[in-house]
Structures are given as C-alpha cells and as structure tokens.
C-alpha cells in the first residue's frame, strides 16, 4: 500500500481499504486527489487539478464482501502538489511507528 497501482477489476476487502489505497496514492505521488460525495455503495475519487484526467471509481460487488474498481481515468496530467490534506498527524504517526 505504499504506492498502489490501480487497475480496473482490482479488488479490495472493503471500502475502507480502497479509501486508504487512494490516500496512499495521493500522498506518495503528491497529487490533489479528493473524494467525491459518496454513497455507501460506491466511491469515486478524482484529481482536482485542472486538466488532470485521473479518477478511480469503485463499488461493492453484489456479495457485499468485495469492493472492486469499475472504471478509472488516465494517468495524472497535472503537476505535483506540495500540500496534501491526506497527510496528517495520524498518517505520519502510522508511517513512523511501522
Ligand atoms: Zn492529477
């Protein structure tokens, strides 16, 4: 989960695992990723930098035990950002405790 590579069809054990993978991607790659308003069954994350085509969209499978990437956009076409709201004291603590 240091720098997850997303592909369509990739499966996660839960929506939380998926969210954490997106956060890890955003932090590691210094991208302005944010979550769109989500409903309980699906998650869409986008890059909010203008012009960037990156997004990833996933939803639960019918069994409600597997969260799967259904579609995603291209690689980031944006510049890196040096502020990231996913970097907070909890994340930094986790990283260094590990
Ligand atoms: Zn981007």
Image (spheres, rainbow, N blue to C red):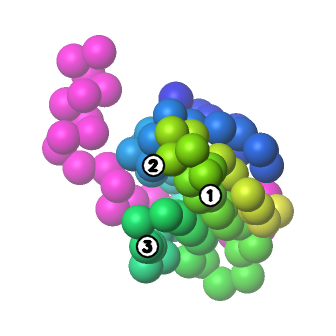
Q: Is residue 15 left or right of residue 92?
A: right
- Give the camera-side residue of 22 and 39: 39
Q: Is residue 1 above or below residue 10?
A: above
- Give the camera-side residue of 80 and 45: 45
User: Which residue is located at x 71 percent, y 74 percent?
Assistant: 52
1 and 2 marks in contact (CB < 8 Å): yes
**Magenta-colored span:** 75-98
Please give the residue where the numbered disc 1 appears in the rendered image.
Answer: 58
Mark pair 1, 2: CA separation: 9 Å
Dominant secondary structure (helix, strand or loop) of the stretch shown in magenta: loop
Say if residue 61 shows up in the picture: yes
Please give the residue where the numbered disc 3 appears in the rendered image.
Answer: 39
User: Which residue is located at x 29 percent, y 15 percent?
Assistant: 98
Residue 67: numbered disc: none
Residue 89 percent across, percent down from the top left: 17, 44
Mark pair 1, 3: CA separation: 11 Å
Ranked by sequence position, the earlier of labels 1 and 3 is 3
Residue 85 covered by magenta stretch: yes
Judged from the image, the secondary structure of the residue bearing numbered disc 2 is helix
Residue 15: numbered disc: 2
């Amino acid at each position: 989960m240091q720098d997850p590579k997303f592909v369509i069809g990739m499966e996660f054990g839960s929506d939380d695992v998926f969210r954490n993978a997106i956060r890890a991607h955003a932090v590691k790659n210094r991208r302005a990723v944010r979550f769109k308003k989500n409903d309980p069954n699906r998650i869409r994350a986008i890059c909010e930098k203008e012009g960037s085509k990156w997004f990833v969209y996933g939803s639960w499978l019918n069994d409600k035990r597997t969260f799967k990437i259904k579609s995603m956009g291209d690689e980031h076409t944006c510049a890196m950002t040096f502020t990231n709201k996913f970097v907070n004291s909890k994340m930094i603590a986790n990283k260094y405790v590990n």
